[in-house]
Image (cartoon, grey):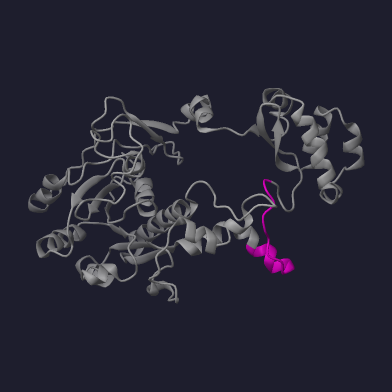
Amino acid sequence: MSALADLRVLDLTQVLAGPYCTMLLADMGADVVKIERPGGDLIRGNPPYVDDGDEEAYGGYFQSVNRGKRSLELDLGADDDREAFLSLVERADVVVENFKAGTMEKFDCGYETLKERNPGLVYSSIRGFGDPRTGETHRQGQPSFDLIAQALGGVMEITGQEDGPPTKVGPGVGDIFTAALNAVGILAAVHHRERTGEGQYVDTAMYDCMVSLAERAVYQYSCDGESPTRQGNSHPTLFPYDAFEASDGYVVIAAFSDGHWATLCEAMDRPDLAADYPDAPSRLANREALRAEIADWTRAHESAAILDLLEGRVPAAPVQNTADIFADPHVRDREMLADVAQPGADDPMTVAGSPIKMTETMPRPRGRAPLLDEHRAELLGEEVDGTPEVAESD
């Protein structure tokens, strides 16, 4: 049995942050029912596709973060559909939504209403700027996306090259980090309910989560009163801790401890550097000159040769692209690539596996993403006979 096999989650979210949160729960065994607005999640049609977008039910974006869920299409503005939703709420453990603050209240489906139908309900929201219930601010109601959250939360200001512009982190961390923290909050609230019988409201804001993600900048500013800014791949207090160009690509080297520094200097055949800069303060004070020395050495060697000298003795790695990741046996051995059926295509689609590993209840993608409204009969039928049946999507 999966760790969350007894958890029913009603997922009203769309696009990325909310679906990623509920995907984590689905991978751990929760029965996640995706309640979709008429026409379905906005990103159902987003490419890429395996073969032919005209034939396939949805693209990679939707497949990746909605695998293993069930789908029910409802219009909460219609009386019958709203009542169907409320009947599902009575049997649910968790409701998750990522609308702007006040949207669910327009349908008379806000937390207070749902709590009357199910006092033990854990109601969770993901918003750009949070919900007034947990702390009211002037920004609530404003639209937000990953880019907005990264900009406001300080992530972009400390990302990029020293002489370049503020740069967003490649993956949508404003969505994904917020989603992961929301899942943590949901499970904490479920644990609290098991002890007390009391449900509650869980709220994570993208802006808040980016401030948390950039925690180093917060304490740096608190200590010295200066706003940290971009410094490429280096670290403000550790050296060497950087990316270096090899003759055939890039490698990263993190040799900031005295022992690792001595080993790096040995590999470089530069005992003089180990002797002249034996401690962290001396290395930090001369970081530019030392960075140039290391860069001269790495440029003269292929990545494999550098890693042969350092791996196992000094923290070092190649900078990999996605093709390299697919070819890395570690990734396969850790089940971090999962194949799921792609409706309308002959071949499956590969999605990222679950990074959460457990010895007794191993999380994993539980089949493909659902077709729109695919599970209407079983979901609404179970409200009649009271015997839910959860089937993995094939």
Give percent across and percent down for residue 114: 23, 67
Residue 67 appears left or right of 160: left
**Residue drawn at (39%, 65%) of the image:** 143
**Residue drawn at (41%, 57%) of the image:** 182
Quarter of the image with the N terminus is: top left
Closer to us: 117 or 83: 83
Closer to us: 47 or 106: 47
Q: Which residues are magenta?
A: 218-233
**Residue drawn at (54%, 60%) of the image:** 151
Give percent across and percent down for residue 131: 39, 70
Q: Is residue 134 visible?
A: yes
**Residue drawn at (67%, 58%) of the image:** 229
Q: Is residue 259 visible?
A: no
Residue 344 is inside the magenta segment: no
Residue 251 appears left or right of 371: right
Give percent across and percent down for residue 130: 42, 68
Residue 225 is inside the magenta segment: yes
Closer to us: 319 or 34: 319
Residue 250 vertical position relative to residue 304 in the rendered view, above or below: below
- The part of the image, by quadrant, that contains residue 127 is bottom left
- The part of the image, by quadrant, that contains residue 44 is top left
Residue 360 vertical position relative to residue 166 in the rendered view, above or below: above
